[in-house]
Amino acid sequence: MSITWKPEYDLGIKEIDKQHEELIEIINHLNNSLHSLKSGEGIYEIFSELERFSNYHQKFEEDYFKKFNYEYAEEHIKEHRLFLEYLSNLKSDALIHNNLHLAFKLLDFLEDWLITHEQGSDKKYVECFKKNGL
């Protein structure tokens, strides 16, 4: 099932909303790819794409945390690190075992991440970012 960007996902911060839409595209690409794969081939590329995006996006947010002296930066950055650690561990397992099940596990995790992190934790910094002109 594909995820469609909805107006309620908007944080009102153009560049970050654009990046979140990109994450939805990656999730949808992962979903489509998984349903067309007959084995674990191609999983590595999907994990790599997600890692590249996540590192870029999280650094983008974290640079503004520092610049704006965001009060909850430490807790938010910890969530980012746990996300990247989980992704790295799952990627390693998927490469070793060449197992589609692990990629579907990633898909479930990403869908949950959209709800808990982007619609929860990310909304906390909106006021700070807007107050500082972003």
Image (tube, grey):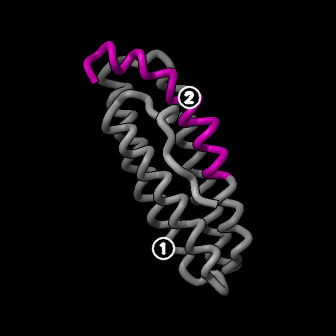
Which quadrant of the view contains residue 95?
bottom right
In percent of width and height, residue 111 lies at 63, 49
Total count of labels:
2
* Residue that mark 2 sits on: 121
Q: Which residues are magenta?
A: 109-134
Residue 99, compared with residue 85, is above or below; it is: below
Callout 2: few (<14), some (14-19), or many (20+) C-alpha neighbours within 10 Å?
A: some
Q: Residue furthest bottom?
A: 38
Q: Earlier in the sequence, mark 2 or mark 1?
A: 1
Of all residues, the one furthest to the right in this rendering is: 101
Work out how far the residue at label 2 is from the one at label 1, CA to CA, in angstroms: 28 Å
Q: Which mark is residue 45?
A: 1
For mark 2, give the secondary structure. helix
Q: Amino acid at mark 1?
A: Glu
Q: Quadrant of the N terminus?
A: bottom right
For the residue marked with disc 2, what is the amino acid?
Answer: Ser
Q: Main secondary structure of the magenta part?
A: helix
At 64% from the left and 36% from the top, the residue drawn is 116
User: Does residue 120 show up magenta in the picture?
Assistant: yes
Q: Quadrant of the C terminus?
A: top left
Quadrant of the rendered image containing residue 120: top right
Q: Position of residue 112 (x, y in %)?
A: 66, 45
Among the 4 quarters of the image, the one containing residue 10: top left
Compare residues 48 and 39 and report the one nearer the observer.
39
**Would residue 69 be counted in the magenta stretch?**
no
